[in-house]
Amino acid sequence: MSKTYEKYYVPAQSPWPIVGAVALFLIAFGAGNYVNEVTRQQPGYGGYMLAAGFVVLIFMLFGWFKNVIDESMSGLYSVQMDRSFRQGMSWFIVSEVMFFMAFFGALFYGRVIALDWLSGGSNNAMTFEILWPSFEAMWPLLKTPGGIETQAMPATGLPLINTAILVISSVTLHFAHTGLEQSKRGQLKIMLLVTLLLGATFLGLQVYEYIHAYRDLGLTLASGFYGNTFFLLTGFHGMHVTLGAIILLFVFFRVLKGHFTPEKHFAFQAAAWYWHFVDVVWLCLYVFVYVI
């Protein structure tokens, strides 16, 4: 009995992985230097490297996505290739979960363990009496042992509005997906566009929140552990929302060109997975950073 084998397309060598690696290096190195420059109030080149990294990253996304789209529309992908894409996207999201778990772990360590040590807990009573006898163990840490004072970002106002925006964006994206599966192209286009607008609104309000934190609350990167974890978690999440919005923008342009069918639309589905993931992360972040 003869066996039938599916053709598995293997693309030619691509420059995009190394371009992406350069982009991530520039972002990481630039962000680290930029944070130090802002904290020490010393101008430098970190901000320029960070901006260059994002430019290279966007260039890489455009080039790599174009290649993948061309290959897909040329009929080069098989069912097995689709399974590979699903597995790859699934593991990518798992890695992103671990990424955020590390930062939530740092928040837990600081709030539950380090804060107790600073207040003289365990065997640190003598250290507490010598180094910072007036220190109060409370969260948010509004006064550091070094004397830097700040104000906490409230859970109401902009953070609550942004939470509602992201939750609604998940709902609109679900309806866009439903429209695609039911061949309702009008519903697909409108709901996907609304999702993009909601994502852009979220990012705009987050920028305004940062301005409010620096200008009105004295909440900066120099505000000790509370300020550091606040900007670390919300900033990295904002970066992921930006990436998710860029991916959805590519998907939206493909929808306008008539791509995707009810039977074959994993690119849309992968983008939806990622967007729902960043929404869930924000809900956890909102509870542990703003509320508790």
Image: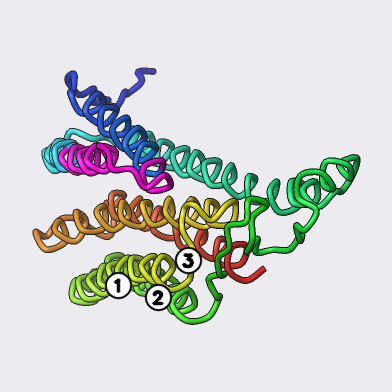
Q: Which residue does the image show at 65% across and 60% down from the upper left?
A: 141
Q: Nearer the viewer, residue 89 or 262?
A: 89
Q: Are marks 3 and 1 in contact (CB under 8 Å)?
A: no
Quarter assignment of residue 177: bottom left
Q: Range of the magenta residues?
A: 36-59
Q: Nearer the viewer, residue 66 or 108?
A: 108
Q: Which residue does the image show at 38% across and 57% down from the upper left?
A: 238
Say which residue label 1 marks.
201
Q: Residues within 10 Å of mark 3 (few under 14, many from 20)?
A: some
Q: Amino acid at mark 3?
A: Gly
Compute the Cα span from label 2 to label 3.
26 Å
Compute the Cα span from label 3 to label 1.
24 Å
Count of marks, rendered view: 3
What is the x, y in percent for residue 264? 27, 51
Q: Amino acid at mark 2?
A: Ile
Q: Are marks 1 and 2 in contact (CB under 8 Å)?
A: yes
What is the x, y in percent for residue 113? 77, 47
- Classify mark 1: helix, strand or loop: helix
What is the x, y in percent for residue 42? 33, 43
Q: Earlier in the sequence, mark 2 or mark 3?
A: 2
- What is the quadrant of the C terminus in the image? bottom right
Asked whether residue 44 is drawn in magenta, I would say: yes
Give the label on residue 165, or none: 2
Display colour scheme? rainbow
- In this rendering, which labeled residue sits more in front, label 2 or label 3? 3
Predominant secondary structure, magenta span: helix
Say which residue label 3 marks.
218
- Classify mark 3: helix, strand or loop: loop
